[in-house]
Amino acid sequence: MARSTPTYTPVRNYAFGFILSVFLLFSDISYGTFAPLRGLVQASNLYAQMVSRSIFENVSNLLYSFKQNRNLTQENKDLKEQIHKIRTQEFIKSKEAEKSFEIINFQKTLISSLKSKDINIFKIASIDLRNYLCCSTHKIFLQNLNQVQVLENTPVFAGSSYVGQTKSTYLNFIEVILFSDTKHLLPIKSNFFYCDARGKGKPMLISCKLNKNIDDFQNKISDAIFTSGLGGIFLKDIEIGNISAINSISINEIEVVITLKTNPLEENFFGIIGSEADEI
Amino acid sequence: MKFSNHLIILFTIMLGFALDDFMNPVSIKLFVELNFGFLIFAYWVFALPEKIQSSAALIYGLIIDLLFSNVIGFNMLFFITTSYIIHLYVFRFRIFSYFQLSVFFSGSSTIYTACKYLLLSPYNYSYIVLMVSFLITLVLWVGIYFVMRAFRRSFFSNL
């Protein structure tokens, strides 16, 4: 009966590996020791993806242009290409116009909501979809090509509401933690209560526990929820979502589930108040 | 074993984890959490126990943690533990039937998933996900076993 390893690896090597792994895991979970390293690796991955994509596009463009040259002898095809080109250009122009219009509209919303003109707009680089759809960690990366100085814990706006806070910057990317992340706490209020809502680890959902009876919450589903401004980070009275469910935990304790107003998956542009803006 | 062989093994494990990343957002809606990466690693240790030892398991785990995980140490811990258990019972596994092997590797994969949820995402811990994943992995393991065996025989004919 084999009770020892068939290889020449002694058990102490496994024990050493086990202890080392447990130590690294504990230090990372408890203190986030390797968070900067992971952020750097993720940012490098994004860079590699962007570079490889542009190389692929250039190569495919090159191959495509060779093909086109070969077909130049056929007048009929030339004409078709011209028509195609004109259509493509018009399509691009219309898309560019739509994009500019979208940015201008978003800027107007930001200025009217946040009462500040020092607002930087960033395009989304990537969303951690794997974790966003299943797990506790909900974060996105924004492209910061102009290397704008962004402070940590600055509110991030998208659509017509806040969606999260900046966490850190890696290379030319800004890491944003979303409200639905279980590590995020957001001070909120409604017409009849104040609380700190924690992310539920599910898309667009946050919740808070209150020492109240469920009978006090009759007909409160779909009531609007606003930021309370008590944390000193977010402006108060910005609508962030609606009550979507009220669950009874015990006799005098309930959980209020709030569905957020903005879906980060549907947004292209995210606004962050500049570091030189007036203090809130 | 040559360094290039280690690279090929690591590449297959990374491919498994990439496949997990690609498929899990869809499969989780059906209460299935796939662990191709972990199963491929387990296959390699099972198939080449004398070639993949503790140091290799530790380094593979570290690289996978850096590239695919939210914490450093999680895959290192599971790779080294799985590697030790497989090394310990490798001769016994040789006389196991495919079904017994499936139960063992599917069970290991389910423990891996359970610990992942308990440590990294306790709010999403779900027994139904574990049970369905166990049953699905039971079937998937046989496929992974034969595909990886064919791959190993074509690439590592001398091992």
Image (cartoon, coloured by chain):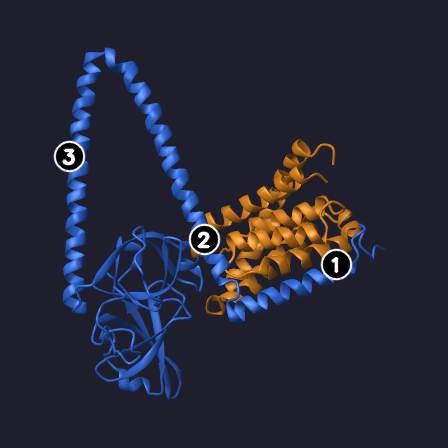
Chain colours: A blue, B orange
| 3 and 2 marks on the same chain | yes
Q: Which amino acid type corresponds to the residue marked 3 in the rendered image?
A: Glu
Q: Nearer the viewer, mark 3 or mark 2?
A: 2
Identity of the residue drawn at 18% across and 43% down: A96
- Which residue appears at 50% of the width and 58% of the height? A37
- Vertical placement of A67 versus B148: above or below? above
Residue for badge 3: A90
x then y, percent, for residue A132: 40, 59
Q: Residues within 10 Å of mark 1 (few under 14, many from 20)?
A: some
Helix or strand or loop: what does disc 3 sit on? Answer: helix
Instruction: Determine crowd level at label 3: few under 14, some 14-19, many 20+ residues with C-alpha closer than 10 A.
Output: few
Q: In screen coordinates, is A100 left or right of B74?
A: left
The Cα–Cα distance between marks 3 and 2, rounded to whole angstroms, is: 37 Å
The one nearer the camera, A2 or A16, is A16
* Of B118 and A54, the residue lying toward us: A54
- The subunit letter for the residue under badge 1 reads A
Dot 2 alpha-carbon crowd within 10 angstroms: few under 14, some 14 to 19, many 20 or more: some
Image side of residue B49 versus residue B35, left or right = right
Q: Which residue is mark 1?
A: A13
Q: Callout 2: helix, strand or loop?
A: helix
Q: Amino acid at mark 2?
A: Gln
**Which of disc 1 and disc 3 is earlier in sequence?**
1
Residue B82 locus on image (x, y percent): 68, 56
- Secondary structure beneath dot 1 equals helix
Residue tagged 2: A42
